[in-house]
């Protein structure tokens, strides 16, 4: 599909660049800043990650905010909040300050992701959605490459302090949001969106997939990177290179994964994703070689692109007027487990890191069972194979 310069699609891609650069800088520095400057252990990093996910858990509140401001404008404001939280992170390397700036960053990040998902499903034709979402992943990866390369270059070559790197990442996000607000027109809504919380019984399988996806995602986001730093001693520069490789892989593969999902359907894509994740998590639990750990990390990240299938599945079964409200609700469901898993599993980590990853494998098994209930051709009235429920 072609994307014109001032189209809704180009706006989504442009804002994705700002979000990706900012969050990539924050994520790239996270474990090293936490361990080297704030003296975190597994317990504190678990607390931080649980705090970070609270705004995601409260993403349903976006419905009430959208009663007073249009989604497109809220996307700009969310990106500015993300930038401000990142910009301020390095100023005070203390536990409380790190928690506070993380909350601010996370509010912006999760609201932006919620709105971006909502606008994508509203603005795009169903036949183009999977491919375009693959392009978004590719653009996000390309922007991440810029961020990771910049962090690596400035840290490795000039030993630039954490504070300047955080300021750079946050400042870029803020400037992109302001430029987008000025440069792009306000695009009309295709379908008037319901301005209340919508929970429909017939969406139950999508909700279940979201819940399990959020649970197993925490194992990767919180503990896979922490494993690299704590067990294998990866430096900031090495973590940057690992993220760079991930991003380079996603640029060519994510759009192809999107096209493949559009061709074969959501059910096969989800089954392959969860089978792969079972193997990856068991591998994390057993790995003793850093090279094998890197391979597992790359595979783990690649499977994230296949989560496009969840979004296109929902777009096919949803009432178009439910999309904005459901984007917030599904984000909240996705983050229920995220609120307690990091801190709970952080305690488990102290005693047995392997047990954390075995638990991730079990989550993938449950997700696989749910994926087997997705119809080959989902649509309104054909949401599940077993357990059909009317609204």
Image (cartoon, rainbow, N blue to C red):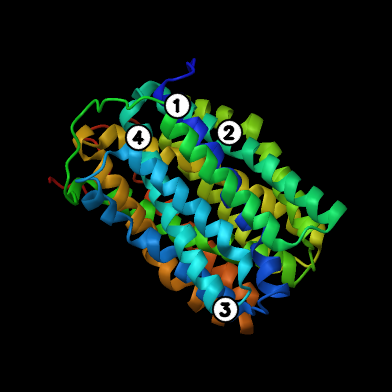
For residue 265, side relative to residue 166 (left or right): left
Q: Is residue 137 shown left or right of residue 298? A: left
In terms of image quadrants, where is residue 376?
Answer: top left
Circle 4 sits in a helix, a strand or a loop, which is it?
Answer: helix
Task: Give residue 95's mark.
Answer: 3
Identify the residue at horizontal 57%, vertical 80% (top origin).
43
- Identify the mark at residue 119; answer none if there is no mark: 4
Binning the other alpha carbons within 10 Å of mark 3 as few (below 14), some (14 to 19) or many (20 upward) gives: some
Could you tell which of marks 1 and 4 lies nearer the N-terminus? Answer: 4
What residue is drawn where x is 37% and y is 52%? 209
Q: Is mark 2 on a helix, strand or loop?
A: helix
Mark 1 lies on residue: 183
Q: Mark 2 points at which residue?
A: 139
Residue 334 in the image: above or below residue 14: below
Quote the CA–CA distance across marks 1 and 3: 39 Å
Residue extending furthest toward the right = 157
As measured in the structure, the alpha-carbon distance from the residue carrying label 2 to the one carrying label 1 is 20 Å
Label placed on residue 125: none
- Give the vertical position of 258 relative to 156 (above or below): above
Q: Which of 159 and 25 is in front in this view?
A: 159
Sequence-first disc among 2 and 1:
2
């Amino acid at each position: 599909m072609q994307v014109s310069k001032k189209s809704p699609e180009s706006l989504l891609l442009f804002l994705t660049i700002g979000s990706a650069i900012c969050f990539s800088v924050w994520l790239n520095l996270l474990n090293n800043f936490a361990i080297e400057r704030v003296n975190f252990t597994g317990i504190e990093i678990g607390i931080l990650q649980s705090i970070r996910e609270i705004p995601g858990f409260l993403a349903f509140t976006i419905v009430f905010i959208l009663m007073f401001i249009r989604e497109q404008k809220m996307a700009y404001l969310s990106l500015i909040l993300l930038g401000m939280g990142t910009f301020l992170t390095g100023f005070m390397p203390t536990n409380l300050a790190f928690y506070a700036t993380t909350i601010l960053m996370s509010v912006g990040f999760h609201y932006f992701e919620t709105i971006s998902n909502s606008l994508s499903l509203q603005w795009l034709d169903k036949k183009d959605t999977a491919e375009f979402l693959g392009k978004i992943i590719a653009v996000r990866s390309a922007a991440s490459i810029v961020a990771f390369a910049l962090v690596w270059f400035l840290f490795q070559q000039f030993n630039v302090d954490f504070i300047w790197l955080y300021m750079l990442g946050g400042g870029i996000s803020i400037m992109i949001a302001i430029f987008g607000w000025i440069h792009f027109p306000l695009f009309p809504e295709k379908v008037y969106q319901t301005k209340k919380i919508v929970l429909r019984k017939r969406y139950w399988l999508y909700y279940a997939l979201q819940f399990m996806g959020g649970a197993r995602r925490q194992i990767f986001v919180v503990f896979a990177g922490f494993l690299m730093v704590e067990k294998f001693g990866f430096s900031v520069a090495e973590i940057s290179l690992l993220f760079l490789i991930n991003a380079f892989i996603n640029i060519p593969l994510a759009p192809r994964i999107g096209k493949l999902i559009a061709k074969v359907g959501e059910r096969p894509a989800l089954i392959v994703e969860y089978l792969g994740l079972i193997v990856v998590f068991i591998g994390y639990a057993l790995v003793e070689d850093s090279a094998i750990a890197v391979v597992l990390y790359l595979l783990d990240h690649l499977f994230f692109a296949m989560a496009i299938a969840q979004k296109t599945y929902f777009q096919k079964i949803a009432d178009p007027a439910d999309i904005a409200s459901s984007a917030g609700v599904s984000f909240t469901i996705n983050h229920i487990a995220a609120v307690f898993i990091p801190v709970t599993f952080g305690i488990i980590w102290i005693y047995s890191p392997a047990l954390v990853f075995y638990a991730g494998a079990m989550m993938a098994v449950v997700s696989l069972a749910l994926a087997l209930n997705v119809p080959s051709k989902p649509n309104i009235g054909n949401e599940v194979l077993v357990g059909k429920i009317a609204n």
